[in-house]
Amino acid sequence: MTNTDILLEDLEDVLDDATSMPMTKKSLVDVEKIKTIIEDIRLNTPHETKQAKAIIDSRNTILEDAHKEAKSIIEEAQAQARELVARDQITQTAQAEAAELLARAKEEGEAAVRDAQAHASEILGNATAQANDMLAAAQKNKRESVAAVNNYAEDTLLKIDDALYKALQDVRGIRQNLMRIPGDR
């Protein structure tokens, strides 16, 4: 499990632990905790990118090793072919064997390169998909957190507005009552 996965679980825990507001579907969340977790996710993303780069570097190393091995096999086959040709009595046999060794070495080298390329491509594809999934999940969680915070702020402002309106109505009522009292003026 990656650090980003752990941080996303922490974010879900903060949302799960949110205090529900009575008679609403809204919840109170610790905004600072959410911001801290989002920042940690941002900081972890480069680490996961480095992991993907390491996988790519590993792929390149595998390819280089395969090329070196193929070259070594070919050079060995060529050396054996030259040695066989040097023997006069078996020149024809040596040439045939050399050609066969060279062809087999070339086939084995090409097969090794193909296998290494396929393996490296698979690793790169998996790493890219995982990085994209983690980034999409982090962005989704960020949007959901921002929406939750905005909803909470909107609800709070509406309650304050209602309270101010009621207080203003009470002041107007008291003022009208004061204006009706005879004799005090």
Image (cartoon, rainbow, N blue to C red):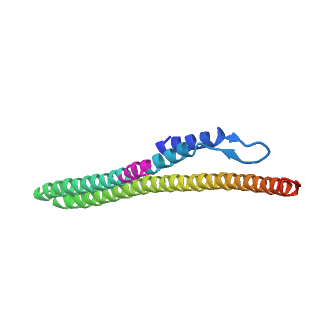
- Image location of residue 125, percent across then percent down: 46, 57
- Image location of residue 90, percent across then percent down: 16, 56
Residue 6, placed above or below residue 153: above
Q: Is residue 96 left or right of residue 167?
A: left
User: What residue is drawn where x is 42% and y is 53%?
Assistant: 119
Residue 22 falls in image quadrant? top right
User: What residue is drawn where x is 46% and y is 56%?
Assistant: 128
Residue 21, placed above or below residue 65: above
Q: How many numbered badges does the structure rendering display?
A: 0
Q: Which residues are magenta?
A: 43-53
Residue 60 in view in this figure: yes
Q: Main secondary structure of the magenta part?
A: helix
User: What residue is drawn where x is 54% and y is 56%?
Assistant: 139
Quarter of the figure that contains the C terminus: bottom right
Residue 88 in view in this figure: no
Q: Is residue 22 left or right of residue 18?
A: right
Q: Is residue 117 left or right of residue 171?
A: left
- Image location of residue 9, percent across then percent down: 57, 41
In the foreground, 113 or 142: 142
- Residue 106 is a magenta residue: no
In the foreground, 100 or 41: 41
- Image location of residue 59, percent across then percent down: 35, 53
In the foreground, 157 or 3: 157
In the foreground, 107 or 70: 70
Q: Is residue 111 left or right of residue 3?
A: left
Residue 20 falls in image quadrant? top right
